[in-house]
Image (tube, rainbow, N blue to C red):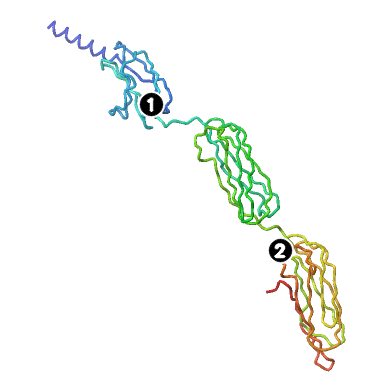
Amino acid sequence: MKKWIVFFIGFIFTVGFSFSQTITVTKPDQNSDWEIGQSYLITWTKSGEMHNTVRIQLYKGLQTLVLTLTGSTPNDGSYQWQIPQTVSPDFYHIRVRTIDGEVTGVSAAFRISAPVINKPDLKVVDTFVEPKPRRVNETITFSTKVQNIGNRKADACDGKILITGPQGFQPRTIPLRIPELEPNRWSLLPSIYTLPLHGVYKNTITLDTNDDNDEIYENNNEKVKLYTVDPAPLPDLIVCIRNGGSVRINVKRKVWASVRNIGDAPSAKCRLRWFIKQNDVKFFNVPRLGPGQHIVFYREPRWPTKGSKRMEAIVDYYGVVDEKKEYNNSVEGQITVLLPSQYYRGGVASKKCSNSD
């Protein structure tokens, strides 16, 4: 009876003692996101009497051992660990166990992430070409938006824009100076120039041409932008004339010719030559005409013989105006002259223009 009592008391003492021995891992916790290659402090608390040396191991799940961080370290509540590159990004547990295997503590599941490279990274994130439309010999503003998408400051550096274009255009290089940029900051860099030919142009933007910055990615420092340049705005003069109808012989009849600028730029002053058969040739001064403007000229000829009489008007007769089209400056018309004995019809006159198909 006494032996049974002694055994029972000893059992109770032993069980109570074992339940009082605990290790609680406090770091990492469920919110920890540790980066491969970085150093972190593993911490734990203990209660009760236990072995003064522990083994620390990394587990995936609760059953798969990944590696042993240390086979033996003092059971003092902390251990500094640098995560090796051989660990893959995933969720893990840290297990802290006494050398004798009597007491074990396991952390909450925590994340180990791929390393963050602490470098700058310059990138052309956008380009803008103004104005629209763009025309030959007009000022073009080409803006380059450069951003530091890395996580360290980018030093000021040089860049360039190589402009290539249509046949006959000599390639041109424009220097860029990129300012110092903190992470996630950007700068808009305008370049102003003119282009002498119309057609398609290609701008190749290159950043950090002298390799002043050690960047996360070195292959994203170039961007290509294509854009078109339209011909320069030019005037385009056309001439219209009264055409058709009839008139009696030796009777004056008012006829007209008009000049219109159908281009998109003002014209220079020029001369209109107006020929009327069996009359004469007259010249008229055509003033400067803005886009859409026109002017009308009148004559009152008479014809001494019957028949169809030709009229011809030519604007910019001496070729002083640089025009969009040079082949639509002349037009011919006619009027019919009748004898007094013939049935007279005034006829229907129409307008005929030099740009008519």
Q: In the picture shown, does residue 80 fall above or below 235?
A: above
| Residue at 29% from the left image edge and 12% from the top image edge | 51
The location of residue 304, given as percent across then percent down, is: 86, 87
Q: In the picture shown, does residue 282 fall above or below 215?
A: below
| Residue at 71% from the left image edge and 71% from the top image edge | 355
Q: Is residue 114 left or right of residue 188?
A: left
Of mark 2 and mark 1, the one earlier in the sequence is 1
The quadrant in which residue 318 appears is bottom right
How far apart are labels 2 and 1 at the CA level? 72 Å
Say which of 281 and 74 sits in front: 281
Quarter the N terminus occupies: top left
Q: In the picture shown, does residue 355 fall above or below 337?
A: above
Q: Nearer the viewer, mark 2 or mark 1?
A: 2
The location of residue 141, given as percent across then percent down, is: 67, 47
Residue identified by numbered label 2: 324
Residue identified by numbered label 1: 84
| Residue at 47% from the left image edge and 31% from the top image edge | 117
From this viewpoint, which residue is outermost toward the left? 1
Q: Is residue 67 left or right of residue 162?
A: left
Q: Which secondary structure, mark 2? A: loop
Amino acid type assigned to the residue bearing label 2 in the image: Lys
